[in-house]
Amino acid sequence: MKTRLLFIFGLVLLVALALAGSASAAPPSGDFAVVQAAAEKYLANLKSPVISADALWENLNDGD
């Protein structure tokens, strides 16, 4: 129980530090901001491909 509580505390601390670091980063500017906005717009409309475990196995083991 103590180990689990320590793990959860560490995870919460890690997330908090990650959020604090991203909040202090400077906003992108120039060409990078344009490319980033276009990429985010493109990726927001993209659906994740779904493949069954059997199809994945066949794809990975078909010899090519």
Image: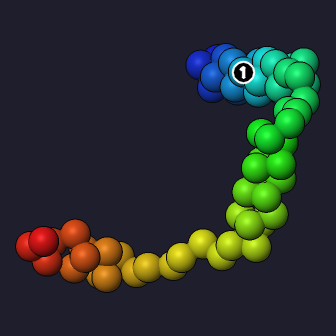
Rendered image quadrant of residue 28: top right
Q: Residue most toward the left? A: 63
Question: Which residue corresponds to the image point at 22% horizontal and 69% vertical from the top-left?
Answer: 60
Picture residue at 40% right of the left edge, 81% below the top: 52
Identify the residue position indicated by label 1 in the image. 14
Give the left or right position of residue 52, taking residue 12 as reference.
left
Instruction: Please name the residue shown 64% across and 22% down the image.
Output: 7
The location of residue 47, given as percent across then percent down, is 66, 76
Residue sitting at 83 percent across and 26 percent down? Answer: 22
Amino acid type shown at disc 1: Leu
Residue 16 visible in the picture: no
In the rendered view of the protein, which quadrant contains the C terminus?
A: bottom left
> Which of the two residues, 22 or 43, is positioned nearer the viewer here?
43
* Element class at badge 1: helix
* 61 lies left or right of 33: left
- In this view, the residue farthest toward the front is 31
